[in-house]
Image (cartoon, coloured by chain):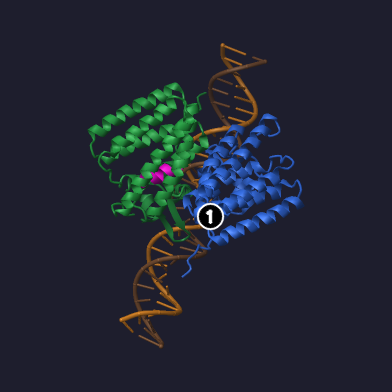
Chain colours: A green, B blue, C brown, D orange
Amino acid sequence: MPDITSQTYTRADEAFDCLQTAIVKGDLAPGDKIGELDLCSRFELTRGPLREALGRLESRGLLVRRPHAGVKVVAVSASELVELYRIREVMEGLAARQAAERMTDQEIADLQATLDSHEAMIDEARGQAYYQAEGDYDFHHRIATGSRNTKLAQMLLGDLYYMVRMYRYRLSTSAGRPHRALGEHRRIVEAIALRDGELAEFLMKRHINAARKNIEKQIQEGILTI
Amino acid sequence: MPDITSQTYTRADEAFDCLQTAIVKGDLAPGDKIGELDLCSRFELTRGPLREALGRLESRGLLVRRPHAGVKVVAVSASELVELYRIREVMEGLAARQAAERMTDQEIADLQATLDSHEAMIDEARGQAYYQAEGDYDFHHRIATGSRNTKLAQMLLGDLYYMVRMYRYRLSTSAGRPHRALGEHRRIVEAIALRDGELAEFLMKRHINAARKNIEKQIQEGILTI
DNA sequence: CTCTTGTGGATTGTTGACAATATACCTAGA
DNA sequence: TCTAGGTATATTGTCAACAATCCACAAGAG
């Protein structure tokens, strides 16, 4: 009996997914105050399941709620965004180390193939921030999963990445950075393929550090205003 | 207008807190399948707010839910518990580093005073695992908060610590360990007082590493069965 | 004797109506 | 004109009933 994953989706689950993607994609802008009835008509459901979904999203930090006052999409300040990357640095470093110890050879091969397709996408979709962000997300997603650390993957994929992706689309990609990032990705995978956990951790931390510095620079230059 | 924190607690909030502490204290054992109606009569509320609380707890990983089948308290396996400590190691290391950079002198003085009272508690309540665990929690709580990293503190205090505390009470405390742990705490605080972030991070990581090894030993010896 | 299958019962998911509260506006006074 | 206070409205929090789904048990076939 392959009771893999309960395929019964409840309306609350549906609302949860829809809202999450709506927030990440920017359909609901940070700071927006959203009314429950609006959402009900939007997703064709009643307030019961909706409130459950709102509760889950609040618990994950994507919404802030004040009793009797309503919910609004979380607005991450510039400094908080930087702090997010500090957390990512240590957590994804750990993920890379454990991935180097635990990923199967097949997974590593797939990861390398993924990078090839990313490279093609970068050349193809020159300047299209969307594809670059998606490729980047794909890479980090695989490593988080490959760590075989359930809770770690859950925290990264279920918490941090959604918040990061909220703001990633509006980051300007300076010329040449995608290729540099891809090079960093390649070296991380090489370290994983060599089963060198320490090196993988070091490289991943440096990779995210670079991303953080890039954001800090954009903030200082006033390019990124949030 | 000191609009600090809305003091209006909704019943869902109430149920959330009660359930959380019930799970942590062990009143609801891991793996227990809990019915909604039971909880309703227990907390004197209806299923609406209760389900919202359940949703939040599920989102935080304290409950697992299968549609139409009910919710049960999460059962963390031995290996998953160890993985939890690996996550704590890197995250609390970061917290210690940032706390060293950002805590006020007053907070550091309070922290030192806290350790003094912990020492008294250890001598007094010899072998009373409860007080030791509470003192330990207090220490780590203050450092997480002192990091001034909102999301980091949120993840540590709102996610990881609850899961760790679920199992901390049933850990046997080998003779002399509380004093050793206290010594480690003192050295961490010293590093923070010196504003030496790197050292604080190193010491904190080593401290949690020691706790992890202790757990692994207990698992191997069959003392800890979960 | 074991495995499959069908039904009864209980539990969950959902709905719409009711009660409580914060925001916004309007009025009155300084 | 600006501030303070009260009230109205809209939105949220809560409740109890309805519908859909899974689990356990029992009966029958292999």
The C terminus of chain B: image quadrant: top right
Residue A193 is inside the magenta segment: no
Q: Position of residue B14 (x, y in %)?
A: 57, 55
| Residue at left offset 54%, top offset 49% | B96
User: At label 1, which amino acid type do we have?
Assistant: Gly
| Residue at left offset 34%, top offset 48% | A215
Q: Secondary structure at mark 1?
A: helix
Q: Position of residue C28 (x, y in %)?
A: 39, 85
Q: Position of residue B201 (x, y in %)?
A: 53, 45
Disc 1 residue crowd, few under 14, some 14–19, many 20+, Cα 10 Å: many
The answer to which of D20 and B51 lies nearer the viewer is B51
Magenta residues span A159-167
The answer to whether residue A67 is seen in the rendering is yes
Magenta segment main secondary structure: helix
Marked residue chain, label 1: B
How many numbered markers are drawn? 1
> What residue is shown with label 1?
B146
Residue D23 placement: quadrant: top right
The answer to which of B195 and B19 lies nearer the viewer is B195
Q: Is residue A161 above or below residue B14?
A: above
